[in-house]
Image: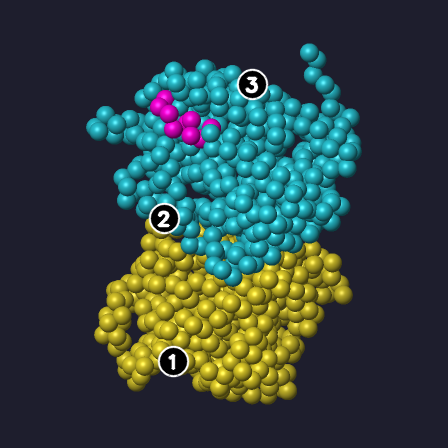
Chain colours: A yellow, B cyan
Amino acid sequence: MKKKDYTPMWKGLGIDIEAHNGLLKFLGKAYADIYLSQENRPKGMEYLDFVITEIHGLRIEELLEAKKGGRKVIGTFCLYVPEEIILAAGGVCVGLCAGADIGTSQAEQVLPRNTCALIKSFVGYKLARLCPYVEACDLVIGETTCDGKKKAYEIFNDLKPTFVMELPQTKSTAARALWRSEIDRLTAKIEEVTGKEITADSLRGAVNLVNAKRKALHRLSALRRAKPSPISGRDALLVNQIQFYDDPVRFTEKINSLCDELEERVKGAIGVTPADAPRILVSGCPMAAPNWKVPFIIEKNGAVIVAEESCVGERGIRNLVDEEGSTREEILDRIADRYIQIDCACFTPNAERLDHVLEMARDYGVDGVVHYAIQFCTPYAIEAHKVAKALEGEDIPLLKIETDYSVEDVAQLETRVEAFLEMLKDRRKQQ
Amino acid sequence: MKKKDYTPMWKGLGIDIEAHNGLLKFLGKAYADIYLSQENRPKGMEYLDFVITEIHGLRIEELLEAKKGGRKVIGTFCLYVPEEIILAAGGVCVGLCAGADIGTSQAEQVLPRNTCALIKSFVGYKLARLCPYVEACDLVIGETTCDGKKKAYEIFNDLKPTFVMELPQTKSTAARALWRSEIDRLTAKIEEVTGKEITADSLRGAVNLVNAKRKALHRLSALRRAKPSPISGRDALLVNQIQFYDDPVRFTEKINSLCDELEERVKGAIGVTPADAPRILVSGCPMAAPNWKVPFIIEKNGAVIVAEESCVGERGIRNLVDEEGSTREEILDRIADRYIQIDCACFTPNAERLDHVLEMARDYGVDGVVHYAIQFCTPYAIEAHKVAKALEGEDIPLLKIETDYSVEDVAQLETRVEAFLEMLKDRRKQQ
């Protein structure tokens, strides 16, 4: 079947066609190398392969169709922005965090060079006119999670109007009250942009829908506790990345099917790596698609990533919204409560995260932890010190990686990862 | 007169005597080069010279005397922490932000290398046992102004118990409510530590006292509008730095005397530089003592700094607390209102700062602006883009500097500053 030509659609969105073709070619090659080269992949991953192939094609077409039908497309950069509120107003929610070394030179015209790669990437995508998602958005929503994003949104706002939610920095009663009022402010804004009233019923439906998506992802996580793991860390990461783009109902159905298959694999003790492959927990910064560099390095050196303590991973999906609320205000209360539970390093103190890292290391039977910080991500880079102390207390080996989206340090990272994995294997032999 | 030997006092505070002697020697030399080498200094600066000479000696002795008398010493890192509340409980408030490349290797054991120099310096001073102020403190108070400080306080707290105030990131009604509740939390904490009740009367006295200090500094600022400026930027910066350490009553009296002298100078058109020296506004990050690098480079190349749009400068002292409140709650309301007005780049949006930069450039008759960002200070480094756009709109020349506390880039900075000043002189000729 000949692939559809989306050029007219991209042109309509103002995309730089030539540069975009180059980007797609580059991403296709990277995906083939990192994903399609894997052996013994679950069959259910075919759907994810399809989604990736069509990520700037069919999915964008769907968004534009939705817009024609009167729905609004809302872009977000962070999992503190409640998808439920957007869905409750009939909106489509898409994640705009970006994981490629794209538009970096353009981004560095307006941002300091020592800004984290994730921020440079989303600003760069916009300036280079390479992201059909951001162009399709009727509104984008930022949040005050870190200095870099908080201040970059002020500049981004000149490129695309950006509504910024204030996330507090502690979990005190007063901070929760501020957060609760921000949930109201978002609700009003979404109602204004969509022209739809958000009701208890529409909220309840959205809560159930997003909870169902999270439950499917919980199933996937639980299956990765098996030894050997039935799925690679790369593939599981991809699932977690795609959740920010795909239609939530379809996605949930497909992930549940994938989990059915993985259950069979677990019963038959079928893994993607030999049973004795070192099991790794990756902890730290989010890996937005197509940021696959570190997982690829870890897994191609013979280890398997069995869990991500990350925004694109368990930090993002761990908690459900309590489904008990009946009035609109009660449901919004529960949404506020759910989201402020997330244990991002932007909070101080953030002891819950340390507890979760240890709990996950135990529950997933990991041999070691790779702490992943995007270079210049101050909250995670500094919190790494506390994570290291916590892991040391439990005698769990740790490798701290700080990197960006470029390929310049790949050889150096390979050497460090290889040495770390060797050390883990030696420890096992001694145990 | 033989200088007093403070070694026993420093030993009692746990200071590393040998390293501390080295530090004092180094600082003495730097002070002689940067300050005492100046010609035509106001006579009133002798007091400041004396304070600097005794900054780790007599002033620490005073703090220890105050402690013996039952007063508590409270350390702060940021001008968002209201000194009035500390004074109202009979406390002594000292600034702990640090401006020297000291203890950096120790700091980098617990903090990422790409942490800003100010943070590395205060953590380094503590780890290297070189700061008698922090050792003399009964309590230190942090605040959530930036990612670096917010997360570094968690580590600092393990070295010295640190009470952290949550500063919001916007100036919305809900954010103000959070801030107001943090003022109450601080008040309760200070009452607990000092064992003294904070009353409307004691608060009123403290408000008047700190306002008087600010008014003296306003006088100093206003005098620098004169052409030629009667005082160097270095000396004025020193005054602004010393306000964080000195006894506020004595300091106010001395600065008013200095201003009396400067008034005479202005009447006689006596300046510290030739009347045609380029007039510079420095805008950006705080310069904590002894961070004199950039001002020294600017002034030794023939310019004069006439104002600082900085925490250690006009941003820090611009606003007074409204003295009208009569009850304790009313006065605390006014304190909260005064402090949240400060236009640090940690707020989003922060349009007030852009207005202030333009207003100051006009009011002080400057030829150009030097934007000063400490390397890795994300809020100011990103906001520099907006500052640049605002200045461009008014055709005011700008030099952006991003540096740390080391001397490694001095030659490079000299070259850039020299070229900037030449350009300013050329512009003048053409006007």
Q: Which residue is mark 3?
A: B46
Query: For this rendering, which residue is in front, A167 or A313?
Result: A167
Q: What residue appears at the point 50 percent right and 33 percent down from the top-left corner? A: B215
Looking at the rendered image, the quarter that the C terminus of chain B falls into is top left
Q: What is the residue that sits farthest to the top in this orientation?
A: B1
The Cα–Cα distance between marks 2 and 3, rounded to whole angstroms, is: 40 Å
Q: Which amino acid type corresponds to the residue marked 3 in the rendered image?
A: Glu
Q: What residue appears at the point 23 percent right and 25 percent down from the top-left corner? A: B429
Q: Which residue is mark 2?
A: B386
Measured as percent of width and height from the top left, residue B269 is found at 37, 17
Q: Which amino acid type corresponds to the residue marked 2 in the rendered image?
A: Lys
Q: What range is drawn magenta here?
A: B220-228
Chain name for mark 2: B
Query: What SS does tag 1 mark?
Result: loop
Q: What is the residue that sits farthest to the left in this orientation?
A: B430
Asked whether the residues under the numbered discs 2 and 3 touch, taking CB atoms below 8 Å apart as contact, a structural biologist would say no
Q: Is residue B119 visible?
A: no
Q: Is residue A60 above or below residue A281?
A: below
Measured as percent of width and height from the top left, residue B107 is found at 62, 42
The disc label shown at residue A196, or none = 1
